[in-house]
Image (cartoon, rainbow, N blue to C red):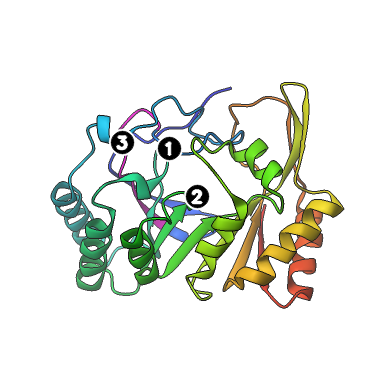
Amino acid sequence: MPVFLFDDLIFGPVRSRRLGVSLGINLLPLHRKLCSFDCLYCECGWTRNRNPLKTELPTAEELAFLLGNKLNELKGTDLQPDSITFAGNGEPTLHPEFAKVISDTLSLRDRFAPTAKVSVLSNGSMLHLPEVVEALKTVDNNLLKLDGGREETIRAINMPLKAFRLHDYVRQLQLFDGNLIIQTLLLRGTYKGRTIDNTTTQEINAWIGLLQQIRPQRVMVYAIERDTPAEGLIRICKEELETVARRVQDAGIEAEVFA
């Protein structure tokens, strides 16, 4: 199916269903994806290049220059951003200067768009690096992925490209002491003849159990929005998402639905 890739380092602003008027930052290559996961539903397509050390990436200085110019251009206009959002063509925390980029972005936000939130959408694969964890603690919206309650489900949906242990990941998420937002995409379908479903009672029960250990600020529950690289995936309806969100709320955790 068609894929969606960003061809600019600074893109938008766009209207985000989760973050409002969002000015995007892509720390990764233009026109192709660089990620540590290979998610079935990723709008950027399949992961082909896995090594950021062998890839030419924009420097922190280049990104700061471009972002400062863009924020100054948008200042006082209807498109002044609600969020400065790290997303782009893969996993932003793979950038070797990620911590410096975040520090520069916070300074530029304070100067040009003090009401904007700084948001990072991450799969959490680099949380073994202390500098990544510390940088994420400084942003307003630290959005980390958790697409299942069991390791086998996460492996099937997200296909991490290196060793993944759910127990270790939950422990890493707990290091934020609640200063994080969990983002979970719900889906069902088939891939290569295998049933894929993170909406079953067993799966939702296990997932909520993990959320109770992590104790995030809130949980964002959403469905497939764009074309996916894997065929055979089904978009979950809003009513079903709302049922799941109510279960999260019953467990004492704030939940929002985006459909």
Q: Is 50 placed left or right of 169 in the picture?
A: left
Q: What residue is pinned by disc 2?
A: 123
One can see residue 64 in this view: yes
One can see residue 78 in this view: no
Q: Is residue 40 magenta?
A: no
Q: Residue at x 52, y 41 (%)?
A: 163
The x and y percentages for residue 169 are: 55, 56
Give 170 or 143, whichever is nearer the viewer. 170
Occupied quadrant, residue 227: top right
The kind of secondary structure element at disc 3 is helix
Q: What is the span of residues highlighted in magenta in the rendered image?
A: 22-33
The x and y percentages for residue 181 are: 54, 65
Precedes in sequence: disc 2 or disc 1:
1
Residues at marks 1 and 3 touching, judged by CB atoms closer than 8 Å:
no
Distance in Å between CA atoms under marks 2 and 3: 16 Å
Q: Quadrant of the N terminus?
A: top right
Q: What residue is pinned by disc 1?
A: 35
The kind of secondary structure element at disc 2 is loop
Q: Residue at x 47, y 71 (%)?
A: 176
Q: What residue is pinned by disc 3?
A: 52
Residues at marks 2 and 3 touching, judged by CB atoms closer than 8 Å:
no
Give 145 or 226, whichever is nearer the viewer. 145
Q: Is 99 placed left or right of 78 in the picture?
A: left
Distance in Å between CA atoms under marks 2 and 1: 9 Å
What amino acid is found at the position of numbered circle 2 in the picture? Asn
The x and y percentages for residue 143 are: 50, 60
Residues at marks 2 and 1 touching, judged by CB atoms closer than 8 Å:
yes
Precedes in sequence: disc 1 or disc 3:
1
What amino acid is found at the position of numbered circle 3 in the picture? Pro
Precedes in sequence: disc 2 or disc 3:
3
Residue 197, compared with residue 75, is above or below; it is: above
